[in-house]
Amino acid sequence: MKIDIDLKAGFLQELKREVLATLTPVERAIIEVSTGEIGNKPDAVKLGWLKMRTKEPWTKQQYTRALDAVMKKLRAELEAQSARKE
């Protein structure tokens, strides 16, 4: 399984690969489209890329809500990891 995620994008750099591997294929696609070189593209390009990857049509509102949910999930995992370290 190949994950093309720019780990330098914010708090994602602190996540371990195992955490990213637990994401669903749709969640991984959402993270991939929001980071890296696609992250700098217009929203229409991002939505088209998501449609190509997931075989489902996407709206900007749907993408925004899904990205927010995935980020909250990853933040919670990051907080859990840091709590385990302390």
Image (cartoon, rainbow, N blue to C red):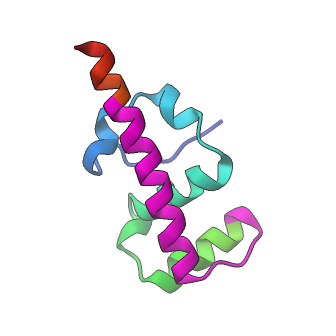
Q: Is residue 18 above or below residue 60?
A: above
Q: Nearer the viewer, residue 66 or 28?
A: 66
Residue at left 57%, top 50%?
28
Residue stretch rendered in magenta on the structure:
53-79
Most extreme residue toward the left is 86
Residue at left 39%, top 67%?
39
Residue 3, percent across and down? 55, 42
The quadrant of the rendering that contains the C terminus is: top left
Residue 68 painted magenta: yes
Residue at left 65%, top 45%?
24
Q: Nearer the viewer, residue 20 or 52?
A: 20
Residue 38, percent across and down? 44, 67
> In the visual, does 45 lie left or right of 25?
left
Residue 78, percent across and down? 35, 34
**Residue 85 occupies quadrant:** top left
Residue at left 39%, top 39%?
76
> In the visual, does 57 lie left or right of 32?
right
